[in-house]
Amino acid sequence: MSSKIRILVPVKRVIDAALKPRINKAGTGVESKGVKFSMNPFDDIAVEEAVKIKSEHKAAVESIHAVTIGSSKAQDILRVALAKGVDTSSLVDVGDAEVEPLQVSKILKKVQELKDSNLIILGKQAIDDDSNQTGQMLAGLLGWPQATNASKVKINDDLTVEVEREVDGGVEVVKASLPLIISTDLRLNEPKFVTLPKMMKAKKKPLEVLKTDALGIVIEERLETLKLEEPPARKAGVRVSNVDELIEKLKELKAI
Ligand code: AMP
């Protein structure tokens, strides 16, 4: 393999960020019937960044590969990633199984090995489970450095990477050589909308389907969901016209 950059972008299909998730009638999970699904917003940012890096460093970047782990329905987000400029893609078909972050990380490690990727750019968190674990576990499994919550990424001529991270009280800049894992924060970039002609063209781009048994992975669940509840409805607010009235109200509510 060459010393060029081969980017891997894991993308997850989640309930569209603009929708409010509802618990299903049986109370066993989130209602998914008749609901719009899209690419996890942080993964959209990861795709955008990978495409930007490739367009700015044409000679240095060999390829961008997107991977999703889910049911066959998740092909739709791979098509979007391909339309946005990703070169090739894989669906790791796990049917309707819920795959926990450790399992996702183990599968991603296999895909990294298959594609010989040396830069993994993924979302800092999936908005459905809010786990914020996959990137960190994958870095642990691979033994790679990780720059989490990136707000700026700079690729140097010697292929070292500088990442800015917004931390309490300022911006931290970290530097690492490849191989490296970067997780994306909201301010890294603003993903562009994908046009219909690009979506049509993307139909010709490669989308392979992989099975977990062929990857030597057995899906196991370590977590059991005991209960799922909607958050309590917020009480209506009260408008006060001055500070005295506010203090009176707070006393009434025994808040002070
Ligand atoms: P999480 O640790 O579940 O919050 O997810 C963090 C990131 O891991 C996501 O933003 C994705 O980039 C990646 N990821 C999680 N689950 C999947 C999945 N099923 N398929 C592909 N990528 C995933």
Image (cartoon, rainbow, N blue to C red):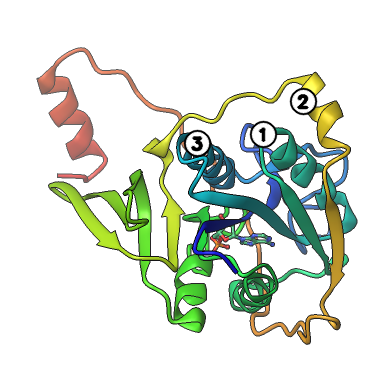
Q: Secondary structure at mark 1?
A: loop
Residue 109's quadrant in the figure?
bottom right
Q: Quadrant of the N terminus?
A: bottom right
Name the residue located 44 percent from the left edge and 68 percent from the top edge: 179
Task: Characterize the local packing of mark 1: few (<14), some (14-19) or many (20 or more) Cα atoms within 10 angstroms.
Answer: many
Distance, label 3 to label 1, CA atoms, is: 10 Å
Viewer-closest of 56 and 31: 56
Residue contact between numbered discs 2 and 1, judged by CB atoms under 8 Å: yes
Q: Secondary structure at mark 3?
A: helix
Residue assigned mark 1: 84
Query: Where residue 243 sits: x, y (%)?
Result: 11, 21
* Mark 3 residue type: Lys
Residue assigned mark 3: 52
Residue assigned mark 2: 198
The answer to whether residue 58 is above or below residue 244 is: below
The answer to whether residue 117 is above or below residue 221 is: above
Query: Where residue 64 sits: x, y (%)?
Result: 62, 50
Residue contact between numbered discs 3 and 2, judged by CB atoms under 8 Å: no
Query: Where residue 222 sits: x, y (%)?
Result: 65, 85
* Mark 1 residue type: Lys
Which corner quadrant of the figure contains ligand 1? bottom right
Inspect this view and state whether residue 11 appears: no
Mark earlier in primary sequence (3, 2): 3
* Mark 2 residue type: Lys
Name the residue located 73 percent from the left edge and 20 percent from the top edge: 195
Distance, label 2 to label 1, CA atoms, is: 7 Å
Name the mark on residue 69: none
Mark earlier in primary sequence (2, 1): 1
